[in-house]
Image (cartoon, grey):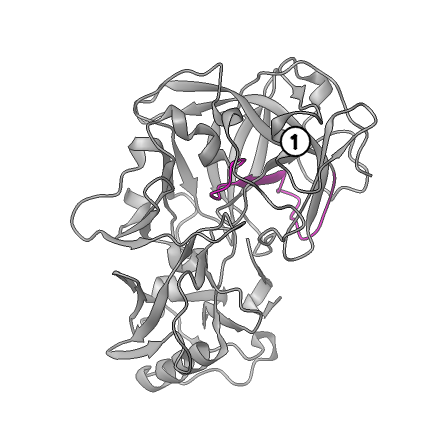
Amino acid sequence: MANILCCFFVLYTFLCQTLTGAYNSGFSVQLIRHNSPNSPSYKSDELHMHRLGSFYQVPNKSYAPNGPFTRVTSNNGDYLMKLTLGTPPVDVYGLVDTGSDLVWAQCTPCQGCYKQKSPMFEPLRSKTYTPVPCNSEECNSLFGHSCSPQKLCAYSYSYADSSVTKGVLARETITFSSTDEESVVVGDIIFGCGHSNSGIFNENDMGIIGLGGGPLSLVSQIGSLYGSRRFSQCLVPFHADPQTSGTISFGDASDVSGEGVVTTPLVYEEGQSSYLVTLEGISVGDIFVPFNSSEMLAKGNIMIDSGTPATYLPQELYDRLVEELKVQSSLLPIDDDPDLDTQLCYRSETNLEGPPLIAHFEGADVPLMSIQTFIAPKDGVFCFAMASTTDGEYIFGNFAQSNILIGFDLDEKLVSFKPTDCANQ
């Protein structure tokens, strides 16, 4: 996750007491769009993940050739994955985040934690909860880890917006639905039991589900079960009917193929587990605007992040896009509403039909319609769902990702795009 989107689309940017128990439970998975525009950001270098070896092999597992499959339901802003965690099972709603790796949930006791509406996960009540010892390979793989007084693996994991979770690594079993509608049980999944968590969270947020490329992400941990480390997502648009839903699939069942598919390489950097690709520029109608005009194009210059609503671009690119949109739009921009700050916004009683955009990734031209590039912060107003940043961290956000079936293949190092009506996927 990266920067945060404020309501009305104004863009601004103890280690705990540890617990003991026995572990191996279950959680079934459902994705639900988060009902707040505020979202935690991509993790900082405070926790640096190293590639892991043998602990990646997940024991106590049931093989499901069709792979896990779940629905994604629309709301405002981020997306929530419903997990039923522990024995007896407890529903946990975690923010889905391709920009980070750790899977974590708020756990009792929770000192200094943010308020959540549903009960927190109580590890002492779960018959299948097993904390990870601090002398284990999993714990030693975490940069800056520490040992609790009980010799358990204590962690601290931070995000770019200063949100942070602190707690204990543990093992649990998860239960998925699969594409053949049968339940799939997976054991020994590493997750963070967060006992001290703070930052920009909504009361419906019960944690974060990291889907990045690092070894502790959910994708990496279950990859060997389903043929490969890959997954696909199809997110319904911001304006979608709340009753509609998209999808997310894991493993071989997540293949993105057929007419209209385009593919771009993933770019890996040392110590980086996010999904970096190369954006060459963006077209507004027939006018191509390069990513930058004054220096050589850098590979891996933008991150695909499901945990950030808006798309963040270099100042020069953003300014030129705004100017082209003004030229090619038949409407006049709003300039008399202080709630909108400096965003490019238009008044329209129906879905705005603005100029089409094309995101030109290396080897992949991805069309973006108005429903992906303009959002309605209030009735009768549509604002450009992109913003500028000067921090060098550029992001292709989840507004732009909607209505595109996007496949992430960690083994082949590819990202695939296919324009899709995700509500009818």
Residue 226 quadrant: top left
Question: Is residue 285 placed above or below 133 in the rendered structure?
Answer: below
Return the x and y of residue 334 as percentages of the image width and height: 48, 82
Residue 174 or 350: which is nearer the viewer?
174
Task: Classify 213 as above or below 323.
Answer: above
Is 311 located above or below residue 201 in the figure?
below
Image position, residue 211 (x, y; %): 48, 41
The 10 Å Cα crowd at callout 1, few under 14, some 14 to 19, many 20 or more, is many
Question: In the image, what residue occupies the spot 49% across and 14% down?
Answer: 60
Q: Is residue 384 above or below residue 215?
A: below
> Which of the image's four quarters has the C terminus?
top left
Which residue is under mark 1? 139
Disc 1 secondary structure class: helix
Type of amino acid at the residue the image marks with label 1? Cys
Q: Which residue is drawn at 67% across and 13% down?
A: 22
Give residue 376's position: percent from left, percent from top.
Answer: 46, 65
Visible residue check, residue 282: yes
* Left or right of 177 on screen, residue 389: right
Main SS, magenta region, reads loop
Chain part drawn in magenta: 196-216
Q: In this view, does 85 lie to the left or right of 351?
A: right
Q: Which of 182 and 98 is in front in this view?
A: 98
Q: Residue at x 69, y 55 (%)?
A: 162
